[in-house]
Image: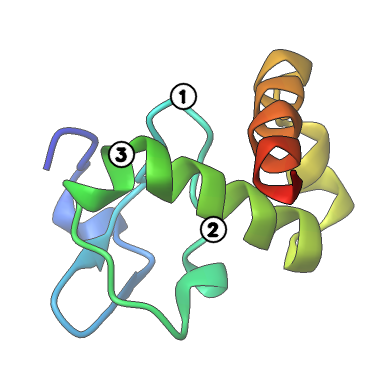
């Protein structure tokens, strides 16, 4: 795990992965509570597709503080990608 920390600092354990201060491809910290219904590997969490999925989940179910931490550049890029799917 590229972004793993001390195992004692892990937040909780998923079916197959311990979440320990994991971050997305663009260095946005992952809230493990938002992944309750999915089972992502650490490698998948570093992919563009996960980043787009996670931003959508964060905007839908995250807290205002979490959304506020998203760099505006990342948000703009995600919105452009999302709009392309609507065409």
Q: Which mark is residue 47?
A: 3
- Counting other residues with Cα less than 10 Å from the Cα at mark 3, is it few (<14), some (14-19), or many (20 or more)? few
- In this view, 44 is above or below 18: above
Q: Which mark is residue 31?
A: 2
Q: Furthest residue to the top?
A: 73
In front of the other: 13 or 48? 48
Quadrant (top left, top right, bottom left, bottom right) of the C terminus: top right
List the residue tagged with mark 1.
26
- In this view, 2 is above or below 43: above
Observer-side mark, 3 or 2, equals 3
Observer-side mark, 2 or 1, equals 1
Q: Secondary structure at mark 2?
A: loop
Residue 86, horizontal then vertical, whole percent: 75, 49
Locate residue 57 relative to residue 72 in the image: left or right: left
Quadrant (top left, top right, bottom left, bottom right) of the N terminus: top left
Quarter residue 63 falls in:
bottom right
Please report the residue visible at 83 percent of the width from the left and 35 percent of the height from the top: 68
**Alpha carbon separation for disc pair 3 and 2:** 16 Å
Quarter residue 49 falls in:
top left
């Amino acid at each position: 795990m590229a972004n793993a920390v001390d195992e004692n600092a892990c937040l909780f354990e998923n079916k197959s992965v311990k979440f320990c201060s994991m971050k997305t491809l663009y260095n946005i910290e992952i809230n493990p509570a938002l992944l309750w219904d999915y089972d992502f590997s650490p490698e998948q969490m570093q992919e563009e597709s996960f980043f787009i999925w996670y931003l959508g989940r964060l905007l839908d179910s995250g807290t205002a503080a979490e959304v506020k931490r998203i760099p505006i550049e990342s948000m703009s890029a995600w919105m452009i990608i999302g709009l392309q799917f609507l065409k």
